[in-house]
Amino acid sequence: MKDIIALIPARSGSKGVPDKNIRILGGRPLIAWSIKACQKSKLISRVIVSTDSPEYADLASELGAEVPFLRPAEISDDRSPDYHFVLHALEWFSVYECEPDLIVHIRPTTPFRDPALIDEAIEAFRRNPLATALRSVHEMSESAYKTFEFAPNGQLKLLAAESTALDVSNDARQLFPPTYQANGYVDVLSSRFVKSHGLLHGDWVIPFTTPAAIEVDTEEDFAHLEFILDRNPEIAQRLFS
């Protein structure tokens, strides 16, 4: 089996939901949900947390993850692209240990996962030698072909359309192609590709369709997660029992 690590980014300083990565959800810190899902994977060999916070690092270690380094502040603000923390981790591995073959990018802000689906995503990527990455997506409830943007003169127009005529948008949604939204359920990255191309995903990205995944960006998102968990306690039982 190739060396496969989970890499969980958990910077401090969130603005929309303060300290959201360690906010309590269902009696556990938010990051615990992602760590536990990776620990229950049959294919992931190590669970690594990348954080700029000593407090977060201590908590992640208590939860069973490894935190072999702290991420520099200059690549840990709210505008830092994901590429920076992935490259930082790979550079650490290249100096101190062997680089992993695959990185499973797990965002702690998407806490509800089935470990079996993580493994399915890894296997899907490994089966395709042409793939540069894998990204999880879910089908949008409304096709993007029915959405709007503002035209230069201020009126509405269909997204990416030449005309500002909108009547076609009233057609039944079944007449439009389905469109998909990237989510934070699971991404699979090739270490070799990231290092050689300076990119995370490239131009041959396998879609991996998951159930609709809620990502925490606002207090309303967090309240929605709590509501779902209250109605579906088996979500927690699957991970923590």
Image (cartoon, rainbow, N blue to C red):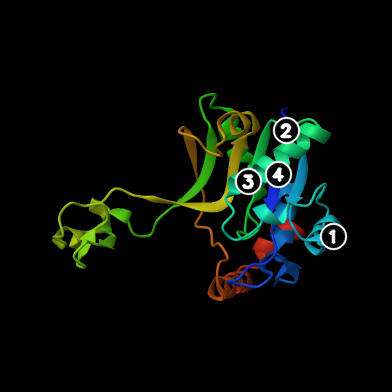
Give the Cα distance between marks 4 and 2: 10 Å
Q: Is residue 94 left or right of residue 197?
A: right
Q: Earlier in the sequence, mark 1 or mark 3?
A: 1
| Residue to which mark 2 is pinned | 100
Q: Secondary structure at mark 4?
A: strand
Q: Secondary structure at mark 2?
A: loop
| Residue to which mark 1 is pinned | 58
User: Which residue corresponds to the image point at 71% horizontal and 37% vertical from the top-left?
Assistant: 90
Give the Cα distance between marks 1 and 3: 22 Å
Q: Earlier in the sequence, mark 3 or mark 2?
A: 3
Give the Cα distance between marks 4 and 3: 16 Å
Q: Residues within 10 Å of mark 1 (few under 14, many from 20)?
A: few
Three-letter code, disc 3? His
Q: Which mark is on residue 84? A: 3
Viewer-side label of 4, 1? 1
Q: Please tell me how many numbered marks the rendered image carries.
A: 4
Q: Which mark is on residue 6? A: 4
Q: Is residue 3 above or below residue 16?
A: above
User: Which residue corresponds to the image point at 77% horizontal and 61% vertical from the top-left?
Assistant: 53
